[in-house]
Image (tube, helix red, strand yellow):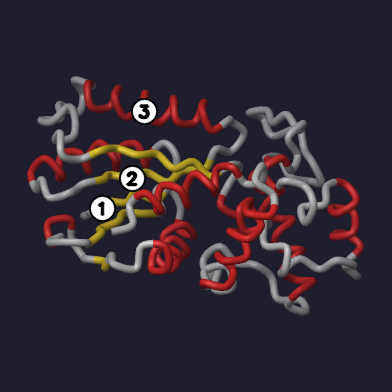
Amino acid sequence: MNFYFVFEGKTESIVYKEWLSVLLPQLSEVDSFDAVIENNYYYESDMGIPDCYNVVANAIQEINEFPKYDYLVLFIDADRFTIEEKKKEAFGTIFEKLMSSEKNYTYKELPHTCKLEVIVQRVCIETWFLGNRRFFVRNPQSELLRKYVEYFDVSSNDPEELASEFIQNNEGTNQIFGYSTKALFHEGYLREVFKERLKGISYQKSRPKEVQTPQYLEQIIVRTKDFSSHLSSFQEFVSFCEKLQF
């Protein structure tokens, strides 16, 4: 099997490449979309929303010109939306772009041998990282982290429900702990966990070396086995990989 991955952000490409080496170890990366042969993947990353939808539409053109792919997979954050809402947005926007007279795309759909999948991270990939209970510090010394834990303890509650009641607005005037979006708050919470665990060393999106390890991934998987209702969007990603094991 061959895969064309589109990652919305920079962190995703770094982490997923390592996680896929564990979950789908047969795959190896190639440097250009037309270099896949067998059990390869090519990826594009770090373009954000909505530009990632343009990248997917372009990828559909490339896959038609070089029809050796089995899956085109888009990885995106749900942000303030539900999984279903974000998938609907993704499929709908990609379809609109393919049909747009402005772009005048040659190909309006993938070859029948290739399938488009959308993996949605609820709320963001940092939400998943909060699922490692072994990394979490039970009795933090940081006053800010204690406030976060008092508000919502991610070690016992589903991280995907963190700040579920918070309503964002386009102006950014609604805030939670000084953050205007759920995703930023989840990332901020993770940074505090890191600083507590690693003695002041904070989480960095561009260098997420701790979370990309097989051990970190394993602990998130253990979390979902112990609590089957937790991290449902992460479970969807793992299930996708499991069905592709070959």
Whether residues under marks 1 and 2 lie with C-beta atoms below 8 angstroms apart, the answer is yes
* Cα separation between marks 3 and 1: 18 Å
Rendered location of residue 68, percent (x, y) = 12, 50
- In screen coordinates, is 166 left or right of 144? left
* Residue 244 coordinates in the image, percent (x, y): 33, 52
What is the three-letter code of the residue carrying label 2?
A: Val
- Report, in whole angstroms, how far the alpha carbon at label 1 lies from the one at label 2: 7 Å
**Residue at screen point 28% across, 65% down:** 27
Residue on which disc 2 sits: 73
Q: Is residue 203 above or below residue 144?
A: below
Of the numbered discs in the image, which one, if any, rests on residue 124?
Answer: none
Number of other residues with Cα within 10 Å of mark 2, as a class: few under 14, some 14 to 19, many 20 or more? some
Quarter of the image where the N terminus is located: bottom left
Check residue 3 in the rendering and tell me which mark sits there, or answer none: 1
Residue that carries the numbered disc 3 in the rendered image: 91
Residue 16 drawn above or below residue 113: below
Secondary element type, mark 1: strand
Measuring 77% from the left and 79% from the top, which residue is drawn there? 199
Residue furthest toward the bottom? 199
- Mark 3 is surrounded, within 10 Å at the Cα level, by few (under 14), some (14 to 19) or many (20 or more) other residues, namely some
The secondary structure type at the circle numbered 3 is: helix
Q: Could you say which quadrant of the image residue 90 lies in?
A: top left
Comes first in the chain, label 1 or label 2:
1
Distance between the alpha carbons at the discs numbered 3 and 2? 12 Å
Q: Where is residue 172 in the image (x, y as percent from the top left)?
A: 69, 34
